[in-house]
Amino acid sequence: MDKVLIEALEVDTVIGVYEWERTITQTLSLDLLLATDIRAAAEDDDLSKTLDYDAISRRIGTFAKENDFELVETFAERLAAMLRDEFSIPWLRMTIRKPGAVPNARAVGVMIERGSLVEVG
């Protein structure tokens, strides 16, 4: 089982429960591990046979611009479901950080895992 890594991807979105947060965009930082089998892509040197991290990153940016949620938890759940569906990802681990949300903390956020590694390979 192999994993594609996207680390420290920054996206701007409307996120937060406070009224003032609903009027601004804030930056979220995402780390993703996406399960796949890279052998066919590596054998043929063919991007179409693996997860395209550029396409996935762009789609995450579009998702962030098109949606606004109060909770980082909701953002994470909806994004994970969309990624798994649109890119046929059987398993993912995602960490989403919201920098500056709590005084004296660099960031707060959530880490989720969805899917099954049994489905890979």
Image (tube, rainbow, N blue to C red):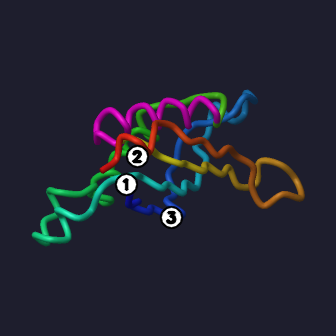
**41 versus 89 height, above or below:** below
Callout 1 touching callout 3 (CB < 8 Å): no
The front one of 67 and 56 is 56
**Three-letter amino acid code at disc 3?**
Glu
Q: Position of residue 110 (x, y in %)?
A: 67, 44
Q: What residue sits right under mark 1 in the picture? A: 57
The quadrant holding residue 118 is top left
**Three-letter amino acid code at disc 1?**
Ser
Q: Which residues are magenta?
A: 73-89
* Residue name at image x 49 percent, y 54 percent: 32
Tell whether position 112 is magenta: no
Q: What residue sits right under mark 3 in the picture? A: 7
Q: Secondary structure at mark 2?
A: helix
Q: What residue sits right under mark 2 in the picture? A: 60
Spatial distance from mark 1 to mark 3, Cα to Cα?
10 Å
Disc on the earlier residue, 2 or 3: 3
Q: Secondary structure at mark 1?
A: helix
**Three-letter amino acid code at disc 2?**
Ile
Disc 2 residue crowd, few under 14, some 14–19, many 20+, Cα 10 Å: many
**39 versus 26 height, above or below:** below
